[in-house]
Image (cartoon, coloured by chain):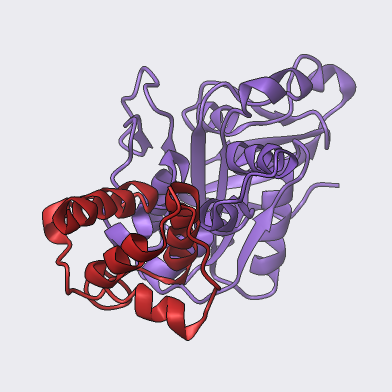
Chain colours: A purple, B red
Amino acid sequence: MNDAPLILEDWRAWYPGRTPARDPRLSVEERPAASRVAPMLRRRLNNSGRAVCDMLAELDPAAECVLLHASRHGDSERTLEMLYALNEDIPLSPARFGMAVHNAMIGVHSIASGNRRSLQAIAASGAEVSALFSEALGYLMEGEKQVVAVFSDAPVPPRFADHTQGPSNATAVAMRLGMSAAVSGGQSLTAHSADEATCHGYRPLQPDDVIAWLLGETPLVCPIRRRVWKMAS
Amino acid sequence: MANALELELKHLIIDTLELEDVTPEDIGRDEPLFVEGLGLDSIDALELGLALQKTYGIKLEADSEESRRHFANLKSLAALVEERRVD
């Protein structure tokens, strides 16, 4: 059985250095500006965080949407290196500790933008896209008009890289989702079950897979949940 | 010497707290470091306390009135380092 259709109203993505980059919704800047975040807040964001704040400012300029942020590994560099520091009796940096929590990025955005709506952080072991669409659908079915779903991830530190299927680049994507087909330019998203043959060869979804799908280059297949999403105007 | 130490502390503050677009000239010696003035926050206070411990061997009690006094501005911070550094 398929889920109720979502409407993809608009999206933004960040993939530094990606080519071709003809779509204006895709930023390829190495260091996003995060110009709408005050410098004293912005200094604590890494490049992914700066990109996420830029994307959210464009997709939710009034700062009134429920926000979902999924990341498989979060800021693994800060988190895992802190564990090594603890093991070596090196005092932890309070700022790094504060920014290592999974909801730190959208927390900074919330402070900067004044968004006091629900903010939800998700990690789903490679099924982040499925989790984001499910959570978005839940909020929309309960009456929210729009939800912004963000998916970001970054490479894990080199000494952990052999133990996980991490992304090779820091990338992020944000989608404003609703259920009203009347939105200009909105595209209907439907989820379908996918059999083993369909899922064969697909890796757990990462943000750059979603970007490729949004650009019309590849299908969006989640081998973990065995789901495929189709988009129609 | 006080000026050399104050300049050293300015660099410590800027580097440790990753202050974007702030130069040593922007930090006045009598200007408040926290909330007003430079605009640092409570996380910065903890971070700065850690940096003082690592750099000068100075241990401060978190959230004590004494620490607030030492952290009031650059001048008071320099006086603290001058008095209690163990290097």
Residue B36 picture quarter: bottom left
Residue A183 picture quarter: bottom left
User: Horizontal placement of A227 versus A220: left or right?
Assistant: right
User: Horizontal placement of A219 versus B23: left or right?
Assistant: right
User: Horizontal placement of B32 versus A216: left or right?
Assistant: left
Residue under the image location 59 percent in, 28 percent down: A155
Direction top: furthest residue: A201
Depth check, front residue: B24 or A56 = B24
Residue A48: x %, y % from top left: 46, 41
Residue A81 picture quarter: top right
Residue A26 visible somewhere in the drawing: yes
Residue A146: x %, y % from top left: 53, 65
Depth check, front residue: A60 or B29 = B29
**Residue A2 vertical placement versus A59 (above, below):** above
Residue A169: x %, y % from top left: 52, 25
User: Horizontal placement of B42 versus A76: left or right?
Assistant: left
Residue B80: x %, y % from top left: 35, 67
